[in-house]
Amino acid sequence: MGIQYISDGAGKTTGVYIPISEWKKLKAKFKDIDPDALKIPDWQVKEVQKRIGDYKKHSEQALDFDKVLDDIEKGL
């Protein structure tokens, strides 16, 4: 397969180039995958939007992820 990886100036991979012929083969091979099954249900989208709104209103209550992990590890 002639896949090429696209990198930024720092060498971090930021994308993938797949020749159209290979893309067509992949689409044909996986044609039974239902793209609608990959969609996020509306209720989940609304819940995430609500949580983001709550965070923006009360960001001072948020905990630092790394600090919480450190505290958990200390307790083990």
Image (spheres, helix red, strand yellow):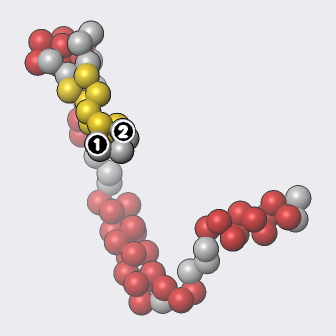
Q: Is residue 45 left or right of residue 36?
A: right
Is residue 56 shown above or below 44?
below
Q: Relative to residue 8, is residue 3 depicted above or below?
A: above
Figure quadrant of the N terminus = top left
Q: Do the residues labelled 1 and 2 touch (CB within 8 Å)?
A: yes
Identify the residue at image location x=48%, y=85%. 59
Eyeballing the image, is 13 above or below 40? above
Q: Position of residue 13 (x, y in %)?
A: 34, 37
The tag on residue 8 is 1
Residue found 48% across the figure and 89% down from its top:
58
C-alpha span from label 1 to label 2: 5 Å
The three-letter code of the residue at mark 1 reads Asp
Which residue of the protein is positioned furthest toward the front in this rendering?
9
> Is disc 2 placed on a helix, strand or loop?
loop
Whether residue 2 is visible here, answered yes or no, is: yes
User: Residue 10's quadrant in the figure?
Assistant: top left
Task: Give the quarter of the image for residue 32.
Answer: top left
Point 85% across, 64% down: residue: 74
Of residues 48 and 61, which is closer to you in this image?
61
Residue annotated with mark 2: 11
Which residue occupies 20% across, 22% down? 18
Residue 70 location, x and y as percent? 75, 65
In front of the other: 64 or 25: 64
* Residue with the most extreme left position: 20
Asked whether residue 24 is in view, the answer is: no
Question: What is the crowding at mark 2: few (fewer than 14 residues within 10 Å), some, or many (at least 20)?
Answer: few
Left or right of 36 on screen, residue 73: right
Residue neighbourhood size for the residue with mark 1, other residues' Cα within 10 Å, grouped as few (<14), some (14–19), many (≥20): few
Image coordinates of residue 44 in percent, x first then y, are 38, 61
